Image (cartoon, rainbow, N blue to C red):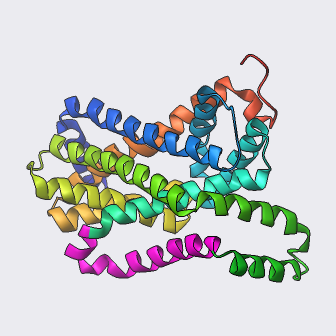
Amino acid sequence: MAGDIRQVARHAQDFRWEFFPLVIALTLVNYSLRFFKFHYYLGQIGVRGLPLRESARLFIAGFPLAVTPGKVGEALKGVWISQAGGVTVARGIAVVVAERISDGLAVLLLSTLGVIAYPRYWPAFAVILALLLGVVIVSQIRPLAHALLDLGERLPGLRRLAHPLREFYEGSFALFRPSATLIAVGLGTISWFWEGVGLYLVLLGLGTPAGWQTLSTAVFVLAFSTIMGAASTLPGGLGAAEASIAGMLALLLSMASGAAAAATLLIRFATLWLGVSLGLVVWAFSRHLLALQSAPSGE
């Protein structure tokens, strides 16, 4: 174990750190494009006139919620959307769910060529794709969705949630319309591609030969590990995403375990932990969010 740690430390020490600012910049491109998707989604559920600054505050403040168990803490983001935008909490939560599903479809799209090249990943790819598309399709078949809601209302445990569930559905129906889904998945595909390029730069910094094969593998590894992390329901995908990245780099690029682990730590710091840090900064200057209060006027 100590030897493994020394190997990872040695590779990190030999990393060409001039690449790292570019990795951070590409992560910020990812965040920026995903923010525009978030702001677009707010308009789809009826939020009007919300300043970009306030919308960005809500978006960035949601990053630390991703490291809660099963990401259930992200429901708090739905409360913030409700307070800032004057919509129901259920519709705000629909935005959070739609963000996750559209991101999932985007990284699956980026993974397609990799899955074709490496069929061992096909079963997981197919199951997750079927689940995500199933949610989108069911949301657009109103008679079926209303029948399921009517059935839920007859169940004792769900009866008191009837109104919130219908509000959640109405928000989901708007967010998963074909045009909205195409825009969201398109933005997501572009944004997650650039994060894959960030992993490519990390690999170059560790001495991996440049080339289209390394680039395409990096994009595939980053995208597919994002899926595995989300599917694990672990906080922030911790453990599952890291194991997936390191394992796939070792398998597909024949990297030494120490180098693969170093690449994993570097890309996760530049992606997950950068976002969490930015979110915590927003929390420090937006105490009203944690107190579940509306923003003070003029803030």
Residue positioned 20% across, 29% down in the render: 18
Q: Position of residue 291 (x, y in %)?
A: 80, 34
Report the magenta residues as a range.
Answer: 113-140
Magenta span: predominant SS is helix
Quarter of the image where the C terminus is located: top right
Q: Is 125 included in the stretch rendered in magenta?
A: yes
- Do we see residue 204 in this rendering? yes
Above or below residue 181? Residue 288 is: above
Q: Nearer the viewer, residue 153 or 209?
A: 153
Residue positioned 17% across, 40% down in the render: 205
Quarter of the image holding residue 140?
Answer: bottom right
Above or below residue 295? Residue 260 is: below
Quarter of the image holding residue 167?
Answer: bottom right
Residue positioned 27% across, 33% down in the render: 22
- Do we see residue 63 in this rendering? no
Judge left or right: residue 151 versus residue 229: right
Quarter of the image where the N terminus is located: bottom left
The mark total stands at 0
Residue lying furthest top: 298
Q: Is 128 included in the stretch rendered in magenta?
A: yes
Quarter of the image holding residue 121?
Answer: bottom left
Q: Position of residue 123 (x, y in %)?
A: 37, 82
Q: Position of residue 16 (x, y in %)?
A: 17, 34
Above or below residue 177? Residue 186 is: above
Q: Nearer the viewer, residue 17 or 121?
A: 121
Q: Position of residue 270 (x, y in %)?
A: 37, 40
Q: Nearer the viewer, residue 49 or 127?
A: 49
Judge left or right: residue 74 versus residue 126: right
